[in-house]
Image: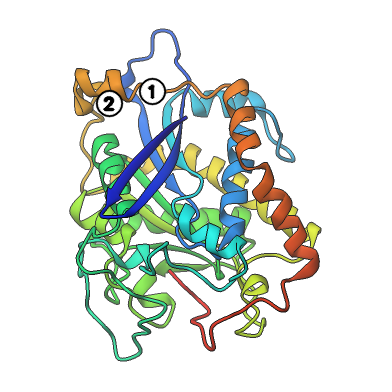
Amino acid sequence: METMRAVDNDYSAAISVITYNNPKRGLDEKLKSRILISFGQHGRELITSEVALHLLSVISKEKRLPNMDLSSLDKTLENLMIKVVPMENLNGRRLVEAGDPCERRNGRAVDLNRNWSVDWGKKEQDFDPYEENPGTAPFSEPETQIMRKLSTSFNPHIWVNVHSGMEAMFMPYDHRNATPDGSAFNAMKSILEDLNHLHCRGRCLVGSGGGSVGYLAHGTSTDYMYDALKVPMAFTFEIYGDLEAPSRDCFRMFNPINLATFNRVLNDWSAAFISLFERGPLLLDRTSDWVPIDSYKELMGRKEVKGMEMIDLGMQEIRTYFRLFLLSSVLLMFMFCSRMSKSKCIPSLSSIPL
């Protein structure tokens, strides 16, 4: 595990990054597919970070999914290098834990999923300045600066930004009602339809973010990954949402409130990620932007690699990480019971965030 930090004036941010790389004797590192997954970009979406921890425990074999074939999992993982950001917006999460379950922005009231450069700052007629503050400029926020540095240096082949608020799996674009052209669209649509059938039981919306949620989002990380960084496969997963929850009950809207649903979400979406790990690399050569996989060390440079060495995620490391998040997990279970009915909330909210 490594911690990346950035500071702007008197505001600072820190993001923990866990790298899974299982070396296999005789396997050229250049042949591995690189996958980058970010959870917890919006503070109120607590369930996303719980899925991150559960997924890490599965790939480190501390936990086992129902009907999971361990030998098949090993074979899949040995061909991948995976970086996981369990909580992108730590400062926003702290605001939620302090008693504001409706807060989605970072520690200085900027929506991190509006602070990226692709179509940044454009405001629709229904623009909500409280919910969607894009910041003073693209990458004005330390959190997005860190994520840009991480994604540029790692240069992933597959990107997933994980949210809650509904059940959906989106491809680009968020800022317009359109999808990528040609083979890229076909490859991404194919894998999302497979995941929807296997793990979402057909409930999930599948398509572009801008064409599916009923509004356009400008300056999002997924559009940046696809348009600017040229990541061949870029997705946004929406893993849970209670669309019948009152708008003031943000905890219920974005997070499961009973243990059975909580466990189902963890297992279903961890299994969906395992399927993505299996199927995604097989479809990469169908995308129009596919290029041979370069060596990670060549991309970062030998000097940078020494300072940001790839970490083999083992059982000791993941136990350490679980300890760091134990307090948050206990708090989450407490919130399931109390629902924080007396916490302050904002008057009106968009119920389906990206």
Which of the 4 image quadrants contains residue 4? top left
Residue at (52%, 87%) from the top-left corner? Answer: 348
Disc sitting over residue 111 in the figure: none
Quadrant of the snapshot with the C terminus: bottom left
Q: How many marks?
A: 2
Whether 210 is drawn above or below 146: the answer is: below
Which of the 4 image quadrants contains residue 158? top left
Is residue 294 shown to the viewer in this render? yes
- Asked whether disc 2 touches disc 1, contact meaning CB atoms under 8 Å apart, the reply is yes
- Residue 271 left/right relative to 227: right
Cα separation, mark 2 vs mark 1, equals: 9 Å
Q: Nearer the viewer, residue 88 or 64?
A: 88
Whether 253 is drawn above or below 247: the answer is: above
> How far across and down, in percent of the image, does residue 61 sit?
66, 27
Residue under circle 1?
Answer: 310
Q: Residues within 10 Å of mark 2 (few under 14, many from 20)?
A: many
| Residue type (three-letter) at the residue carrying disc 1 | Met
- Residue 202 left/right relative to 11: right
Q: Residues within 10 Å of mark 1 (few under 14, many from 20)?
A: some
Residue at (60%, 63%) from the top-left corner? Answer: 98
* Residue at the extreme top of the image, as rendered: 25
Residue at (69%, 29%) from the top-left corner? Answer: 62
Mark 1 secondary-structure assignment: loop
Disc sitting over residue 296 in the figure: 2
* Residue at the extreme front of the image, as rendered: 10
Residue at (48%, 61%) from the top-left corner? Answer: 92
